[in-house]
Image (cartoon, rainbow, N blue to C red):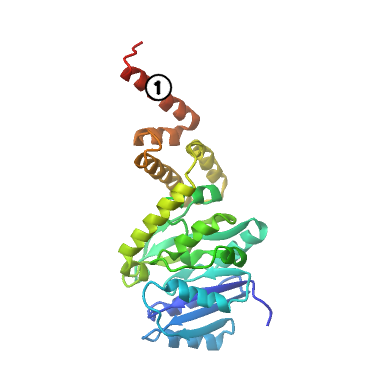
Amino acid sequence: MSTPKVSIIMPIYDAERFIGVTIASILQQTFTDFELIIIDDGSKDKTGEIAKNFAKIDSRIKYFHQENRGAGRLAETINEGIKHAKADLIARADADDMWFDDKLEKQIDFLDKNPEYVLVGTGAEMATDDGHFKMMFLKPLDHEDIVRSLTIYNTFVHSAIIIRREALEKAGGYKNAHSAEDLALWQKVAKIGKLYNIPQALVQYRIAEEGISNKNSIKQKNTADILYANFFKENPPKFYGFLKISSRLKTLKKLKLSYGEYKCLKFKLLDDTRRIGFVYIQNGRMMLGASQVVVITFFGPVGLFVVARASIKSILNKLGYKR
């Protein structure tokens, strides 16, 4: 058999409610040169049976079963799937999420045209357990914005990414991190090559109460907070990044985005800048208030001048100098 363009790794565990729809959405992709590697982590319901039935009718599906590894060891299951992968591109899929038909096509087209990028994600729609739409959320687009925002939150939807295998191996693969294994990996990969998010929701992300992240939310948050803090120390966002927001917004306007997509990304840029500003303040590294950060964000160099002038005036007043 010829080597596929992309290997899709899907760990599954007790997901009989969703697994059929998820696999069907992958098989319906407009880009068809892929293999789907399913690693069943000891499911106790009919999840494995459903997956095996799909494998019987489509040779691109490879099904593997293992004894349950226990909570907090998802990274090991993903790595097991990668061992069976043949392609140079590795995609991730979760058992309870759904892909839109052109997801793979758009991501692979981007990677083929931009060899300097090693990881590409997409936005997502959030849905309830029964598939009802809740909201759309998009992530920062280009590498610089992604790295800045990796200091405060996870900038990729895990079930939406495609990563070059070479970069994944250089980063050391997935490591167990209390359901924050994806965040830890992105921060490592950011030092290897450029990252990007396609400005469209190409995945439906299901909020399931029994999901791994929800079950381990406290440990996940504590682990993520440590990762954010360490990454911030290693990659402190440059102050001049605040001045680039206006040019970022102009770039967004040039993209063929819907009004909702543009509005979502605009809010994300502004809110990320505000949140990063607060982290600086908390660390005592920048004496700027929230209102000053907003002024600089919205008005660029003019805002910086206004803030600098006000700050100088305030210092002079404290020193007893009056005009």
Percent of width and height locating residue 215: 31, 69
- Amino acid of disc 1: Ile
Percent of width and height locating residue 298: 44, 35
Q: Residue furthest top?
A: 323
Position of residue 120 in the picture relative to residue 319 (left or right): right
Q: Residue at x 38, y 67 (%)?
A: 178
Label 1 sits on a secondary structure element that is helix
Question: Residue 322's image quarter?
Answer: top left
Percent of width and height locating residue 48: 44, 85
Percent of width and height locating residue 307: 41, 27
Question: Residue 181's image quarter?
Answer: bottom left
Q: Residue at x 50, y 35 (%)?
A: 243
Q: Residue at x 59, y 70 (%)?
A: 30
Q: Is residue 132 above or below residue 277?
A: below
The residue labelled by disc 1 is 312
Which residue is nearer to you in this view: 200 or 76? Answer: 76
